[in-house]
Amino acid sequence: MEAELEHKKASKRIKKIQVMVAEAIRETCDTTTLMLFSGNDHLDYKPGHFCTIDPHQFGGLEPWAAYLEHLKSKKEKPRAYSLASSPHEKHLAVTIKEERYIPGKTKYPPLLSPILVRRIPVGTRMEITGFTGPYYLPDDIESRTDHIVHICAGSGVVPNWSIIKYALHKKLKVRHTLIYGNRKWDDVIYRHALDDLRDRYPDKLKIVHALSREPGALHPGAHVYEGRVGAELISKHIEDPTAVEVFACGPALSKWDKLQAKREGIEPTPRFMESVVGAFKTVGVPKERLHLESY
Ligand SMILES: Cc1cc2nc3c(=O)[nH]c(=O)nc-3n(C[C@H](O)[C@H](O)[C@H](O)COP(=O)(O)OP(=O)(O)OC[C@H]3O[C@@H](n4cnc5c(N)ncnc54)[C@H](O)[C@@H]3O)c2cc1C
């Protein structure tokens, strides 16, 4: 209810903001964080909110967007990107993971993420629209729980990174457990920044890496689990499932995956979000304590 009201309020305050890319930080081989300078604008957002970026503003994408619009018979929409920055920080930031075109698997090549990840030089000016979204840290979080469990995969860590930084900076009376799923170490976004934050707040932040394709991995100070995030791993890190608040974000089945499976007469293979939602049921986390965002 509070989330819905906040979403409505946020929709009213949404505006276009001119920004300049102050820095482009390569996080992994396919992921970049763009630090965005917005001048003197008052930036009214909550940790967890997202902004949108319209691909049509990039001249180099014009023919590509027109071609895809012709093939799809509809206009290409702005893409949503969670804020990687937290409201107490000077710069805005977004972290983008490049989508891939896999012949025979994906129907069209991705439009915006490749250029944001690879071809945005420092100094580029662009327009973003924001800020909104139902996935954010509620103001009354301390009265709801003293333990937030973050369950993320891949670029799903972005809004949770904002939430964790904010809550620690504001010295909120909550501790955090981040269970973060990736294939390999090299896919872990904010790897060093996460280590630094955990070292600064050892009693407040626990990090559990679940790596599905890196057997025998060890990492100083971190808990490393071999395999995917599932009910067994989640239940190990939640003492009382009725007392935590869970923020889960990661890839889910797209409407196109579901349509394709329907055409083939098969059940679509669950992705990260479908799997963890099933796990929360098994573990016994009540629905009203779940905050979910899928990419
Ligand atoms: C709330 C929210 C927050 C997000 N935050 C982030 C973030 O922080 N970082 C991040 O990296 N991403 C984030 N995303 C995902 C992001 O919005 C984009 O979806 C992503 O970057 C891909 O965009 P693209 O233009 O590169 O690819 P697209 O051009 O959107 O293509 C993506 C895939 O969809 C398929 N597709 C597209 N159109 C069709 C069609 N008509 N029929 C069949 N298949 C189709 C393509 O084949 C391709 O496989 C977020 C999404 C949401 C909803």
Image: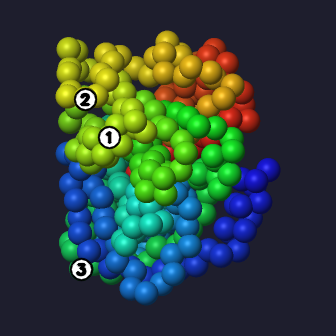
Q: Is residue 105 visible?
A: no
Q: How many marks?
A: 3
Mark 2, Cα crowd under 10 Å, few <14 / some 14-19 / many 20+, is: few
* 3 or 1: tag closer to the N-terminus: 3
The answer to whether residue 29 of the structure is visible from this angle is yes
CA distance separating discs 3 and 1: 32 Å
- Tag 2 and tag 3, C-beta contact below 8 Å: no
Q: Residue 158: x percent and y percent?
A: 42, 49
Is the C-beta of the residue carrying label 3 under 8 Å from the nearest atom of ligand 1? Answer: no
Image marks 2 and 1: residues in contact by CB distance under 8 Å? yes
SS at mark 2 in the image? loop
Q: Disc 2 to disc 3, how far (Cα)?
A: 37 Å
Mark nearer the N terminus (2 vs 3): 3
State the residue position of label 3.
123
Residue 226 against residue 5 in the figure, above or below = above
The image quarter containing residue 132 is bottom right
Q: How is the image coloured?
A: rainbow
> Could you tell me the amino acid type at mark 2?
Gly
Secondary structure type for disc 3? loop
Identify the residue position indicated by label 2 in the image. Answer: 221
Q: Residue at x 53, y 54 (%)?
A: 48
Q: From the viewer's perspective, is 178 left or right of 283?
A: left
**Left or right placement of residue 134 versus residue 156 in this view:** right
The kind of residue tagged 1 is Arg
Q: Residue at x 55, y 37 (%)?
A: 148
Q: Say which of 201 and 32 sits in front.
A: 201
Q: Toward the viewer: 252 or 290?
A: 290
Left or right: residue 287 compared with residue 95: right
The disc at residue 166 is none
